[in-house]
């Protein structure tokens, strides 16, 4: 397993938050949220009383540096079992919007490095064995590069109250019966969504472009908060040391 080591990893500090407020309905539950800088996707779990652990390089911890020992010391020893995992790994090298660059990325190693990032998520899922897990990525080639992920389930933000379009896929094992709150998407440019207007390569632009729609985040929480058994998603799997699925 490439980089499945963490001898010099820092301890978990400001990246973890214990759920609070008036709602303690999920007290004792723990959600690990990977590549989560904004906290939008995991926010409903935190508000409902769950322990939410955000892991992101901008919070000081690189997901690629995690290992089983670090997870045991910093997560499981403090919070117990990891009950759910959210993951939104970088999509730049997978999204169909950048298909014209795929050949060059395949040749110079960028595709391989990005694929390793997704495999790291699968290692963490395999180690933690949560009740459910979901990995988000836009329309692209990820399923072809890693067929063990299975086929993605797609959604649109406007299905859940966010008035724009951005077809996005979810891989994993989770309840797909999200409660809908459909609205009419607003067309703000020739391509449609305001997301299409976000050009440029600045970190701020990337953050806006990749931010989880809050209406979807709420709907996902309602469908995956342990009140129902996940009827959808792929069959749970385990990984061999080389990162390939054994099931």
Image (cartoon, rainbow, N blue to C red):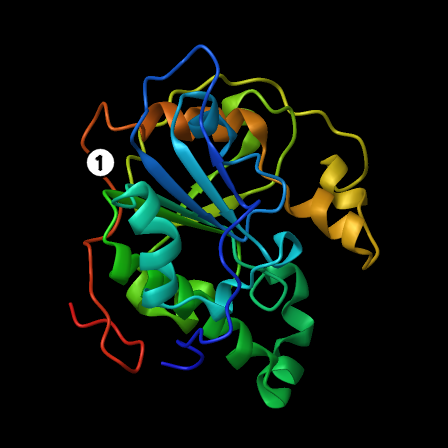
Q: Is residue 172 shown to the viewer in this render?
A: no
Which one is nearer the viewer's eye here, 192 or 180? 180
For the N terminus, the image quarter is: bottom left
Identify residue for label 1.
230
**Residue at 39% over, 69% down:** 119
Question: Residue 179's x, y, as percent?
Answer: 38, 20
Question: Residue 64's x, y, as percent?
Answer: 49, 69
Disc 1 residue crowd, few under 14, some 14–19, many 20+, Cα 10 Å: some
Q: Quadrant of residue 214?
A: top right
In the displayed structure, 243 sits above or below 166; it is: below
In the displayed structure, 208 sits above or below 220; it is: below
For the C terminus, the image quarter is: bottom left
Which one is nearer the viewer's eye here, 31 or 5? 5
Q: Quadrant of residue 29?
A: top left
Which residue is outermost to the top?
22
Horizontally, residue 78 falls left or right of residue 208, namely: left
Which one is nearer the viewer's eye here, 70 or 147? 70
Question: Residue 152's x, y, as percent?
Answer: 38, 51
In the displayed structure, 104 sits above or below 135; it is: below
Which residue is outermost to the bottom?
107
Question: Residue 6's x, y, as percent?
Answer: 44, 73
Q: How many marks?
A: 1
**Residue at 63% over, 80% down:** 105
**Residue at 62% over, 57% down:** 60
Q: Is residue 135 shown to the viewer in this render?
A: yes
Q: Secondary structure at mark 1?
A: loop
């Amino acid at each position: 397993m490439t980089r499945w080591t963490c001898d010099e990893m820092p301890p978990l500090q400001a990246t973890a938050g214990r759920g609070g407020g008036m709602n303690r309905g999920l007290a004792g539950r723990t959600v690990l949220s990977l590549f989560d800088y904004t906290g939008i996707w995991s926010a409903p779990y935190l508000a409902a009383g769950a322990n939410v652990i955000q892991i992101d390089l901008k919070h000081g911890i690189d997901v690629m540096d995690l290992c089983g020992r670090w997870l045991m010391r910093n997560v499981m020893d403090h919070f117990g079992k990891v009950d759910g995992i959210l993951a939104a790994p970088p999509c730049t090298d997978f999204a169909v919007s950048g298909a014209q660059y795929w050949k060059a990325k395949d040749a110079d190693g960028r595709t391989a490095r990005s694929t390793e990032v997704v495999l790291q998520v699968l290692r963490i899922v395999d180690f933690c064995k949560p009740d459910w897990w979901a990995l988000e990525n836009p329309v692209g080639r990820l399923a072809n590069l890693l067929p063990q992920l299975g086929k993605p389930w797609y959604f649109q933000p406007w299905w859940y109250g966010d008035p724009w379009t951005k077809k996005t896929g979810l891989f994993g094992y989770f309840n797909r019966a999200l409660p809908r709150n459909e609205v009419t998407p607003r067309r703000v440019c020739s391509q449609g969504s305001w997301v299409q207007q976000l050009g440029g390569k600045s970190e701020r632009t990337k953050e806006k472009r990749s931010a989880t729609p809050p209406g979807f985040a709420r709907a996902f929480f309602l469908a995956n908060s342990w009140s129902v058994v996940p009827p959808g998603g792929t069959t749970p799997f385990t990984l061999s040391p080389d990162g390939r699925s054994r099931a």
